[in-house]
Image: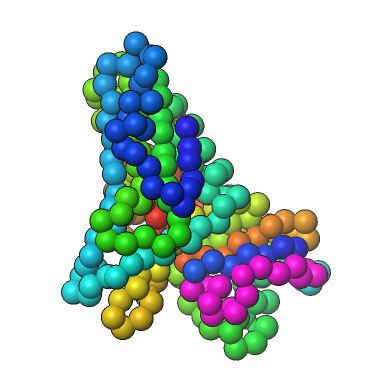
Amino acid sequence: MRILYFAWLREKAGIAEETISLPQTVTTVAELIEWQQQRGEGFAEAFADTAVVKVAVNQEHVGFDHPVSAKDEVAFFPPVTGG
Amino acid sequence: MIKVQAEDFDVGRELENLSSGNLGVGGVSCFIGLVRDMAGDESIQAMTLEHYPEMTEKALAKIEAEARTRWPLEEILIIHRYGRLEPGDRIVFVAAASAHREAAIEACHFLIDWLKTQAPFWKLEETPDGGQWVDARSSDDKAAGRWVTAGRGAEKDPDAAE
């Protein structure tokens, strides 16, 4: 799975982009976030307050109950502030 | 038409191109967003706009398509810049052209409201205390929310994914 991070989530996680092997137990965005929270200090900090974490799967905004699979591109970012 | 670019744009030329050669256009409405020099009490030296290029194109195309289902529009133009911008610089330009003013003005308002809550851009402000990421405003969600029931065509909740 390709994972992208933007804005302060990128800074806290310390990485802009990575490819991971998805654990079999992870089937939804919520489970992916729980897995991220266990990956070390930077990730724990990035995902500490999930109220301000937004997610896109294959470049579409989705909710935390959305399914994820190994071939997806998942992006994590704060609420958008364009315009 | 959608353009996502680092470079500035010429407002006059963009507006002229939008309706040029289309004699069915009776009105053009536009909105231009600029970088301010203050955020609250804090002075801003510059801001850097980060975005998610693959998703930006898709999100803006969806916003354009949604506007076209709601209003009878001849042309739509969305230009959004990224990279480092200074106070006074243009950030965003949206314009809608239609046979009549109502559709053009409403669509323009809709485009900028939905862009604010849907397009994957993030602003990092440079202040005397260092860089700070701009927080999303609940007033932006409210502004986008007004279009959930207003306008013509299909109703779609911009926050349905949340």
Which of the pair B32/A38 is nearer the observer?
B32
Q: Is residue A35 above or below residue B37?
A: below
Q: Position of residue A12 (x, y in %)?
A: 54, 80
Q: Is residue B106 visible?
A: no
Which of the pair B146/B89 is nearer the observer?
B89
Q: Position of residue B56 (x, y in %)?
A: 53, 49
Magenta span: A8-22
As for residue A11 lying within the magenta part, the answer is yes
Residue drawn at 41 percent across, 33 percent down: B77
Q: Is residue B16 above or below residue B33?
A: above
| B67 sits to left or right of B57 | left
Q: Is residue B124 above or below residue A48?
A: above
| B145 sits to left or right of B157 | left
Q: Position of residue B48 (x, y in %)?
A: 41, 64
Q: Position of residue A58 (x, y in %)?
A: 65, 52
Residue drawn at 34 percent across, 11 percent down: B23
The quadrant in which residue A21 appears is: bottom right
| B88 sits to left or right of B152 | left
The quadrant in which residue A56 appears is: bottom right
Extreme residue in the left direction: B41
As for residue B146 lying within the magenta part, the answer is no
